[in-house]
Image: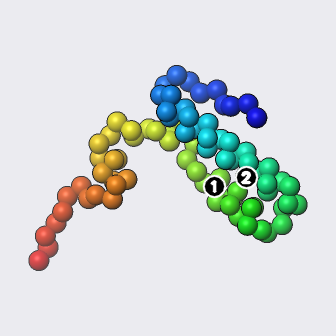
Amino acid sequence: MPKPNFPREFTALQRSVIDRLAEIEQSDADACAGCGGEDCACCEIYHDRQRWVPASQLFNDDDDPMSWQFHRGEDEEECDDE
């Protein structure tokens, strides 16, 4: 399968992640197509992964320090409402 061609706005590591996600998506699609479309685990996985964020949005907030706090589960502020 040919790898998608992304603009140079992504770093080499980001392109590597995007390429790997595309490989997983294609593998899931192939497995789902090969089972006959029945309600099975491979189709469930495939359809769940279709909700993944597109590559164009995947790294949008890499430069936003608040997004990293959110992804790590840290709060912006802690409140004491006692």
Task: Identify the residue position indicated by label 1 in the image.
Answer: 49
What residue is disc 2 on?
A: 28
Residue 26 position within the rendered picture, expressed as x and y whole percent measured from the top left: 73, 45
Which residue shows up at 59% across the image and 27% down it? Answer: 6
Which image quarter is the N terminus in? top right
Q: Residue furthest bottom?
A: 82
Is residue 10 visible to the viewer in this orientation of the structure? no
Q: How is the image coloured?
A: rainbow
Rendering quarter of residue 77: bottom left
Identified by mark 1, the residue type is: Arg
Instruction: Between residue 12 and residue 40, name the one nearer to us.
Output: 12
Farthest residue, direction right: 36
* Residue 78 horizontal/vertical position (percent): 18, 63
Q: Is residue 22 left or right of residue 11?
A: right
Mark 2 in CB contact with mark 1 (< 8 angstroms)? yes
The quarter holding residue 16 reads top right
Mark number, residue 30 = none
